[in-house]
Image (cartoon, grey):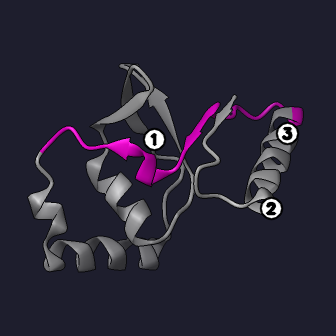
């Protein structure tokens, strides 16, 4: 399991580990890669996501239906850096809504 502790508190990490352990103990499939959305780099032009209108729309959508942590952000790794392959809007939504960790996967499924 990989958990990026860059911006999370000890309490947040402990809670996540306990939650994942409980789910694993109950034979629920768990994701093994958790990263801070601010730790990954975009791979496409995100100028549209930076517009105030887009920010409001993404933030409003998440506040109405909450952040869907079941939707993974696909990443690729180059050296020690992670890059978004698919999921730029989901990553932006996490950042705008101050989500400290979300799960992702590496490479194509």
Is 33 or 41 nearer to us in this picture? Answer: 41
Q: Residue 94 carries which label?
A: none
User: Sequence-wise, which precedes: disc 1 or disc 2?
Assistant: 2
Do callouts 1 and 2 mark residues in contact (Cβ within 8 Å)? no
Q: Residue at x 28, y 55 (%)?
A: 89
Element at label 3: helix
Q: How crowded is mark 1: few (under 14 residues within 10 Å), some or many (20 or more)?
A: some
Q: Which residue is drawn at 64% across and 47% down?
A: 5
Whether 66 is drawn above or below 45: the answer is below
Residue extent of the magenta highlight: 25-44
User: Sequence-wise, which precedes: disc 3 or disc 1?
Assistant: 3
- Which quarter of the image is occupied by the C terminus? top left
Q: Position of residue 55 (x, y in %)?
A: 24, 74
| C-alpha separation, residue under disc 1 versus residue under disc 2 | 23 Å
- Is residue 9 shown left or right of residue 24? left
Which residue is under mark 2?
A: 11
Q: Residue 21 carries which label?
A: 3
Is 4 or 107 nearer to us in this picture? Answer: 4
Element at label 2: helix
Is 96 or 71 nearer to us in this picture? Answer: 96
Q: Where is residue 81 in the image (x, y as percent from the top left)?
A: 40, 30
Q: Residues within 10 Å of mark 3 (few under 14, many from 20)?
A: some
Q: Indicate the quadrant where residue 59 lies.
A: bottom left
Given this view, does label 3 or label 2 mark the residue nearer the observer? 2
- Is residue 15 shown left or right of residue 53? right
| C-alpha separation, residue under disc 3 versus residue under disc 2 | 15 Å
Whether 10 is drawn above or below 107: the answer is below
Which residue is under mark 1?
A: 72
- Which quarter of the image is occupied by the N terminus? top right
Q: Residue at x 18, y 72 (%)?
A: 54
Element at label 1: loop
């Amino acid at each position: 399991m990989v958990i990026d502790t860059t911006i999370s508190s000890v309490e947040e990490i402990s809670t996540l580990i306990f939650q994942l352990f409980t789910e694993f103990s109950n034979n629920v499939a768990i994701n093994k890669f958790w990263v801070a959305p601010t730790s990954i780099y975009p791979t496409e032009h995100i100028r549209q996501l930076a517009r105030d209108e887009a920010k409001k729309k993404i933030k409003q959508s998440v506040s109405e239906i909450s952040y869907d942590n079941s939707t993974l952000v696909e990443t690729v790794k180059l050296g020690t850096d992670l890059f978004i392959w698919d999921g730029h809007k989901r990553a932006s939504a996490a950042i705008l809504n101050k989500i400290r960790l979300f799960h992702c996967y590496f490479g194509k499924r």
